Every structure is written in structure tokens, then in C-alpha cells.
Amino acid sequence: MRYPKRYTRIISARYAALREREERDRDARCAAARKDPDFSAAEKALTESSLQYARAKASGQECGDLKKTYDDAKAALDKICADKGYDLSLHLRCDKCGDTGFVGEKLCTCALPLYQALLREDGAAKNIPAFTFADNRVAETDCAQSRALTVLYDKMKEFCDRFYETRINFILLTGQSGVGKTSLAYAIANELTAKNVSVCFLTAFEFNDLMLRYHRADVSKRSHYMEFILDCEMLFIDDLGTEPMLRSVTKEYLYNVIDARILNGKKTMVTSNLNLEELMVRYGERTVSRMTNKRYSLTRELLGDDLRKFVF
């Protein structure tokens, strides 16, 4: 799993602040212990013997006696700490990661709750309904698309289960309003979020507005608008075709984002009420070509009834 830079920065900063507090607490305990003359003298003896031993060792001298002096000084200080209850250790909350949040490049288990909270709070995922694959009742509904949509739900559940192995990097669902496209997108987004996959869910209007702000922003501030869009593991753009067409923004940035995510192996899902021909007229052949490339795309047109007329 590759964690979005935004999240690693937040987690690293939180854990750095945690370690800083722990170090300040240890320093305060050390300062209090140094008020004891016995402790202060023993610490000074240990420091001096440590320096003498290190210098002798670095210069290649025989240092057996110096090593014994160092060991004795350390034992003397340890005894004073034990006898008088001085605790000078750094109180780490997690021995696995040393309170860094990461074990190597992998997120430590102690940081998972924070990561999961960020996943839920960020990327507009917090705004989507809590609709899951378990909530799907289309197979029990007497609608025209019941069978086709049930098969697609099963395929998308498999997509989520094999998220890091599947060849599918782009999903395009088209069809008239109400046939079930957005609900399926909700189910995928919630399933992936539960699996700790970073998700960004935007309507086409929200995406367009974000790109407009990016377009108008100072160069130094542009990364604020674009970083998570390009870095998240799964981007959803819902209802493509409902947003206004803004000159030098809508078509251009849609293509740029889709192209960049495909080149970087990032996964994207787009839903639209427009068919392929209408998408091509509106966004151009090169954008639709990226969306529908059979090497990495799954394209489905959903035909059927308006599911809003049914009671689930």
C-alpha cells in the first residue's frame, strides 16, 4: 500500500509532536534527579568514563580497564536510580515503531486509527451516504436491470477485494438517471474506505469547482488543490456532464487528471448520464479514449428502470 503524502505528513507531524512531549518529560525528570548530589556525581563519573573509553577505542588503544571503569560507573548510576526511584527512560507508547507511526515504510498498527479517521474525514468521503454492498437489494427487485446490476455489483465487490492486484484502473458507468450508478459508486467507496484505501469522492460540479480554484490560484498554492486528487488511491467523479463547461478548465483539467492518474497507476471511477457519443462531443475523443481503453478500463452502460420508484 502506498499512503498519500497528505496523510503521511499529518501522521508524521502528530507523532513528532508526541515524541517531543515524551522527550520534554524525560528531560524534566533528569533535571529533577540532578538536584541529588549522589546522582549528579554518578552521572558525571559515567560521562567522563564514557568519553575516555570512546577516545581510547577510536584510537585503537588497549581499553579493557577503561571499559571496566565505564561499566562500573554505569552500574553505580543504575543502582542510585533504582534505589531512589529515578526513572530516566523515554516513555514510548509503541515499541514497534518507536512512536514514529511507521515501521519501515509501512504504517504501524498504532497509527491505524488515525489513518482511518483521516480516510473518513478527508477527500469528501465523509459526505457520501453509508451505503454498502450489503445494503444492495436490486436482485430482489422486479426492475429491468436487476440481473445486469447484480452481476456488476459482484464484479465490483471483487474489484474491491483485489484492489491492488486487479488490472482495472478506470471504471466508467453510463446510463440514464436513477438506474443505480451512484449507489454502486457509494458501495465501492465505502468498501474501499473500510479496507484503509484512500478515497476521494466528488461530484462533477465539485471537481470542476476545485479545478477552477486551482486554475486561479497562485502557483505557490496550487498543490493544495491538486495533490490529493492525484495522490489518492481511488478517485470518484459522479455525474460527469452536469457541471458547467468553463473555458480552459473543464475539458483541459479533466483530461489532465485522468491522464496523470492512469500513467501513475491510480484508480478512477466516473459515472455519467451521458452515453459515449455524448461524452465524446462534450469532452473530446482523447479524454473518452483514456476512459475506455480496454487494457485497463471497465466500461458499462446501465439500461433499465428508475430505481427511485421502487421501495427497498
Image (cartoon, helix red, strand yellow):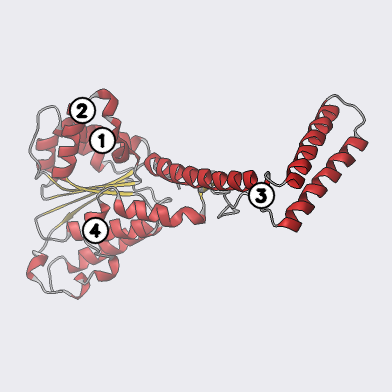
Give SS at disc 2.
loop
Q: Earlier in the sequence, mark 1 or mark 2?
A: 2
| Front position in the image: 124 or 257 | 124
Check residue 186 in the rendering and tell me which mark sits there, or answer none.
4
**Residue located beneath label 1 in the image:** 225
Q: Position of residue 86 (x, y in %)?
A: 68, 53
Q: Is residue 297 visible?
A: no
- Please identify, in this view, whether the residue under mark 3 or under mark 2 is nearer the observer: 3
Q: Residue at x 39, y 51 (%)?
A: 166
Give SS at disc 3.
loop
**Residue located beneath label 2 in the image:** 217
Mark 4 vs mark 1, CA separation in Å: 23 Å
Q: Residue at x 25, y 63 (%)?
A: 130
- Please identify, in this view, whether the residue under mark 4 or under mark 1 is nearer the observer: 1
Mark 3 vs mark 2, CA separation in Å: 50 Å
**Residue located beneath label 3 in the image:** 88
Q: Are marks 1 and 2 in contact (CB under 8 Å)?
A: yes
Mark 4 is surrounded, within 10 Å at the Cα level, by few (under 14), some (14 to 19) or many (20 or more) other residues, namely many
Mark 3 vs mark 4, CA separation in Å: 51 Å
Q: Earlier in the sequence, mark 3 or mark 4?
A: 3
The amino acid sitting under disc 4 is Tyr
Q: Position of residue 8 (x, y in %)?
A: 43, 43
Q: Residue at x 21, y 31 (%)?
A: 214
Q: Position of residue 37 (x, y in %)?
A: 74, 44
Mark 3 vs mark 1, CA separation in Å: 45 Å
* 113, above or below 77, in the image: below
Mark 1 vs mark 2, CA separation in Å: 9 Å
Q: Position of residue 42 (x, y in %)?
A: 78, 43
